[in-house]
Amino acid sequence: MLRFHRLVTMRREGSILAVIVMNVVFMSMLFTRIEQERSLKNEITQNKYVEGNYLLDDFNEASDASIPLVDHVKIVERNWTRRTSPQSCPLFPPGLKGKLDLPGNDSIPPSLDNIAGYHPDVKLGSYKPIHCLARYKVAIVIPYRDRAEHLQVLLNHLHPVLKRQQLDYTIYTISFAGNGTFNKAKLINAGFVEVNKDRQYDCFVFHDVDVLVENDHCLYWCSEEPRQLSYYLDKFDYKPLEYKYPCRSESAPERTKLFGGAVMFSQKVFIEVNGMSNLYWGWGGEDDDLYWRIWSKGYDINNPYGENCRFSMIKHQREGYNRANPGRIPLVYHSIGRMPYDGLSNLRYKKLGFQRYPLYVNITVGVGKQHKKMHDFLSSDFNSTKCEKVKMPWE
Ligand code: UDP
Ligand code: MN
């Protein structure tokens, strides 16, 4: 009896000890976390380029943000010779159809369940050919908020195309959390980082949810140089678009070319240009900024598939939360000088969700909001012909 009593006491002492040990471990983890956040805050405030936090402080609290991310992307040199192995899929995919039927503007797309039913070989957003080695691993990255019908149309249209093109691919939506002003470029940056963590790809196609390729001979294949897939858009009468920016510095291209809709990047080049600018809140400018970035690194628009790369855009209204950004002209003007500081290197966001659905993978991110001072500055009335005289707040 006595022995039994002692045993019970020992057990009780043991469990008290375990609770104490757990508490100590918990407290030390908490302190480490607080210390990490404190040093992150210091790191941010010490960055001389962001005096006044114009470039970084999209969040109210540094603790809201993840760590500056550049070293989170593992740079993997792609083995481009894989494409010429004896098992590689043919250089001309045999099942291509050519010109494709496009859905009418008022037609109702099949439900996601039905689309998934047509493609049992697409597994959790991914597909790869089974009888040959795909030449390219491609991530399709779609900036997204509240465009469910466009997404259905796109998935219904694009899966069959990519399958016929014999790609090893995954489709991702990068969802903008909340109903603040949209920021497509920052979403793309966050998507790029997160997709890199999911799997290694040869290239990334940053793809608007509402553009549809009209011919499957326009291959979503990778190259080391960036590529404009949606080279000819119905919205612009299929004319390759070039325009002069209202103001241009010596170091900028004389003519700006349309570089949006659907564009392809190798990981190496996207990192080389520091991704996209994080500063374009609302509609417009971020694609021109990206063109100036690639141009400044010696690349240009590249479309090896010619007229096959015609795209059609689903007609829609612009959302209230994506109004034209009044400050886009001076921002583009300073694009090249700002490139080393503004992009992947100072990107901060919060990953809020990750779901693998049958037809795509969704990653939801909070990208914060525009700094108030920056907002006020960019909302001032710019005379666009004199924008080179506009000094940016951080200069
Ligand atoms: N987008 C979105 N929800 C929005 C605004 C934009 O999903 O509220 C995404 C979507 O992929 C869209 C792209 O951003 O295709 C470009 O925006 P939008 O279509 O409004 O611009 P446009 O290219 O038509 O001028
Ligand atoms: Mn659109």
Image (cartoon, helix red, strand yellow):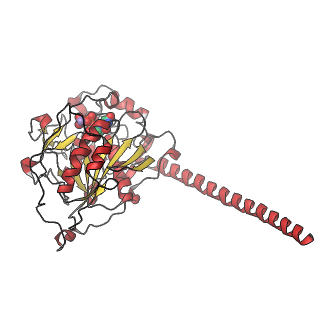
Image position, residue 16 (x, y; %) = 78, 61
Judge by depth and name the residue closer to the eye, 195 or 326: 195
Image position, residue 2 (x, y; %) = 92, 70
Check the image and report above or below for 370 versus 197: above
Check the image and report above or below for 215 versus 372: below
Q: Is residue 298 visible?
A: no
Q: Is residue 169 left or right of residue 94?
A: right
Image quarter where the N terminus lies is: bottom right
Residue reaching furthest to the top: 381
Image position, residue 374 (x, y; %) = 39, 34
Q: Residue at x 31, y 66 (%)?
A: 76
Q: Residue at x 67, y 56 (%)?
A: 27
Judge by depth and name the residue closer to the eye, 85 or 107: 107
Residue reaching furthest to the bottom: 86
Q: Is residue 77 visible?
A: yes
Report the number of numbered marks.
0
Q: Splitting the image into four quadrants, where does ligand 2 fall?
A: top left
Q: Is residue 340 left or right of residue 39?
A: left
Image quarter where the C terminus lies is: top left
Check the image and report above or below for 138 versus 151: below
Q: Residue at x 20, y 51 (%)?
A: 160
Q: Is residue 88 left or right of residue 187?
A: left
Image position, residue 232 (x, y; %) = 11, 42
Q: Is residue 289 left or right of residue 364?
A: left
